[in-house]
Amino acid sequence: ALAYAFLVSELCWSAVGLLIDQAAPGMSEAWPAVVQAALSCALVLAKGLGCTEYSGRQLAALAALMGLFALIVPNVGGYANYLCYPVCVIVMFKDVRLAGKLRLALILSLADIAVHAALSLAGRIPDNLFGLIDRMGLGYSHPNSLGVAVVTALALYIALRYPAWRWWDTLVGVAALVFLYLVPYSRTAVGVAAVMVVLAAASRMCPRVFETGFCRECLALSWPVLGVVSLWMGALYEHIDILSLVNKALSGRLRFFSYAWNYSGWEWLGTKVD
């Protein structure tokens, strides 16, 4: 119940705030943010400490993550949220029956997208806050934010439908990919969505292949290997000509990384390393 209440509070607030502002401009800003923050923290602590069982190994992992946040937050501030939020969600949903909660999360995610899109198309809120005219944000601050919202909804859909996956579920995934490419043109979102849809469809079509230990190990190792390859390409971008083609496909990301690597230094756990 506590996890359910927190989920409703966090997922509803964006859409509810927009609707409140349409009825009474500025009203949502009058709601004291400290109240919502205190309520969220209280619910997370109550669920995490009072309604969840942990093994010694799990407690050690949580302690290590909290120590990591303690190192990062003073240096990078809000960027630590990208690590902190998933951990909070994992803790909240431990020892919880997920099916109903994921279904609620999907409904709220779709409702949030629908509210933003309706208000944006009606001209009540700007399409995006960056003045982009070739990429639509449908009321989100940036087209990539719309991409994140759609990918989140797609991930929830796949998680719910996976045990009974059918061919039309693959079509839903393909439709989401087309939307992500044509509307927000969020390349990262397209890539993430493509991986999810392909793996979900392939693993249901060829279950024996994906059940082998070799396949599972390859999938588990693919992410750290991809991370190392990405770092290698960014660091050597200026020295290997063929990487310019990869950079173009990645909309200039390798060039950005190369510049930061060679001219701006780099950080470890939020601490600058010379």
Image: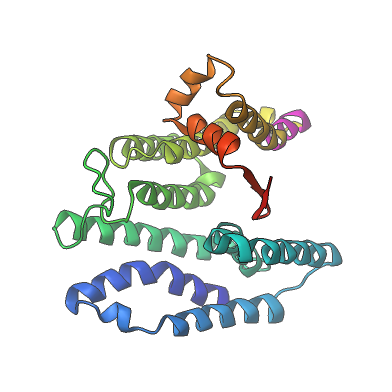
The secondary structure that dominates the magenta segment is helix
Question: In this picture, is 128 found above or below 44?
Answer: above
- Which residue occupies 61% across, 61% down? 75
Determine the residue located farthest toward the right in the rendered image.
56
Visible residue check, residue 1: no
Frontmost residue, 101 versus 119: 119
Quadrant of the image for the C terminus?
top right
Question: In this picture, is 115 found above or below 261?
Answer: below
Q: Is residue 69 left or right of residue 257?
A: right
Visible residue check, residue 171: yes
Frontmost residue, 24 versus 228: 228
Determine the residue located farthest toward the left in the rendered image.
122
- Which residue occupies 54% across, 58% down? 79
Query: Percent position (x, y) of residue 49?
Result: 70, 79
Q: How many numbered discs sit on the rendered protein?
A: 0
- Which residue occupies 39% across, 59% down? 109
Query: Percent position (x, y) of residue 40?
Result: 52, 78
Q: Find residue 119 and report its image quarter.
A: bottom left
**Residue 137 is covered by the magenta coloring:** no
Q: Find residue 204 and report its image quarter.
A: top right
Query: Percent position (x, y) of residue 169?
Result: 43, 40
Q: Is residue 178 left or right of residue 6?
A: left
Frontmost residue, 191 versus 153: 191
Frontmost residue, 76 versus 122: 76
Q: Is residue 191 left or right of residue 73?
A: left
Quadrant of the image for the N terminus?
bottom right
Query: Percent position (x, y) of residue 247?
Result: 47, 25
Q: Find residue 31 and report its image quarter.
A: bottom left
Point out the stretch of residues depicted in magenta: 213-220
Q: Is residue 98 left or right of residue 140?
A: right
